[in-house]
Image (spheres, rainbow, N blue to C red):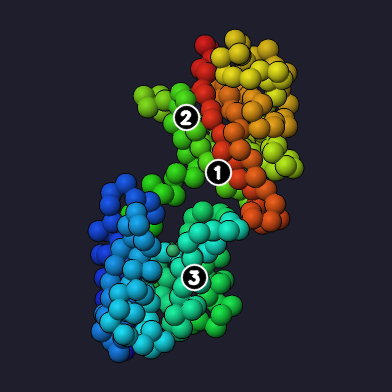
Amino acid sequence: MDKVSYRNFMLEAYQQMLLCEKNLSPKVGAVLVLDGVIVAKGYKTKESHAERLVIESALNHSIDLSRTILFTTLEPCVSIKQNQKRQPCSDLIIQSNIKNVYIGSYDDHPNVYRKGWKALKENGILLNDFDDDIRIEIEKSNSTFIEHFSKGIGPKGGAKLFHKDGAKFEIQFSENDKRTMNIEWTLAGINAAYCYAVKPITCANALYAKTFDDIDNPAVFKGSYSARVEVDEIGIFSGPEAFILVKPKEIKSGPDYGDDEYYVNFEYEVRLKNI
Ligand SMILES: [Zn+2]
C-alpha cells in the first residue's frame, strides 16, 4: 500500500468518528483494511465500541483478521477495573490476531493514557500513528471530552477526576462570570485526599460540617497550603475572589488505579467574596 491510501484510511476513520451521536464522548471511528480495501467501518455507539463493531463485522464476513490493518481514531480501551463485564477492545484486537494498528490519538484520561498502545505493543502488534494534521482534527473534535476532566462551571457542580501526580481542576465561577480558580487534589491514603493550594490560594478542612449549607462563612476556617479531607468531609479553597467548597463523595486508590493513580468524585460550590 502507498502512503496516499494509508492517509485515506485515516481520513475515513475520522469521517466515521464524526458520525457518532453528538453527546457521546469521546467519539471514535474505526476502519479495517484488507489488501488495500476497506472491508469494515464503524463508529462508537452507546452499545458498542468502534473497534468491536468493525471486528465483529469482519468476522461475520469470514475475513481473515490476521491479514487486516485496523485504523482507529483513539487508542483501544483497556480494562481498568477488576471484574469488568465487557472485554476491552485491546484484548479483542490481540485475540483477533490483527497484526498492525494505526492509532489516531491517545486517551486523555490519565488512568488509561497510552495503556491501549502498551497492551498492543506487548503483544507484538505493529503500531503506527495517524498523520499529524488528522490527529489534530481528531483531538479538536473530542475537545469537550478532554475538557471534561479538567474544567467545571459553578456555582454548583460535580466532577470525577482521575489523577496521576495531583491534578488541577479549573472552576469557572458561573455561566456568566468567566473568572476562574484552580483547585488541586493529591493522594492521602484510602478514602481521603489532600486539598492542595498554590499561593495565594489556601485551603482548610471545614471540620464537623456535613453539608455546604452548614457553612455560613467559609472565611472562619484557618487555611494553609494543604488540608486532608475524607469522604463526606468538606474542604475549603480560599482564593482572592472566591471560596470553593468541595465535598468528596468517593476517593479511590490502589491496584485498580495504579500505585500512583487515584480517583476523586466530588461536589463543589463557588461562594464569591464581596471585595
Ligand atoms: Zn473499546
Residue picked out by circle 3 = 90
271 sits left or right of 208 in the view: left
Q: Rounded to the nearest whole Å, what is the CA distance between mark 1 and mark 2? A: 13 Å
Residue picked out by circle 1 = 161
Q: Quadrant of ligand 1?
A: bottom left
Image position, residue 232 (x, y; %): 64, 28
User: Which residue corresponds to the image point at 61% horizontal and 13% vertical from the top-left?
Assistant: 214
Residue picked out by circle 2 = 157
Secondary structure state at the residue bearing disc 3? helix
Image position, residue 247 (x, y; %): 60, 28
Toward the viewer: 28 or 90?
90
Circle 3 or circle 2, nearest the eye? 3
Q: Amino acid at mark 1?
A: Leu
Mark 3 surroundings within 10 Å by alpha-carbon count, few (fewer than 14), some (14 through 19), many (20 or more): many
Q: Is mark 3 within 8 Å of ligand 1?
A: yes
User: Which residue corresponds to the image point at 32% horizontal and 57% vertical from the top-left?
Assistant: 45
- Relative to 16, does residue 214 appear above or below in the rendering? above
Q: How many marks?
A: 3
Q: Rounded to the nearest whole Å, what is the CA distance between mark 3 and mark 2? A: 34 Å
Secondary structure state at the residue bearing disc 2? strand
- Relative to 73, does residue 144 appear above or below in the rendering? above
For the residues bearing labels 1 and 2, Cβ distance under 8 angstroms = no
The disc, 1 or 3, on the residue closer to the chain's N-terminal end is 3
The disc, 3 or 2, on the residue closer to the chain's N-terminal end is 3
> Within the image, what quadrant is residue 93 found in?
bottom left
204 sits left or right of 270 in the view: right
| Residue 61 seen by the camera | yes
Secondary structure state at the residue bearing disc 1? strand
Image position, residue 3 (x, y; %): 32, 83
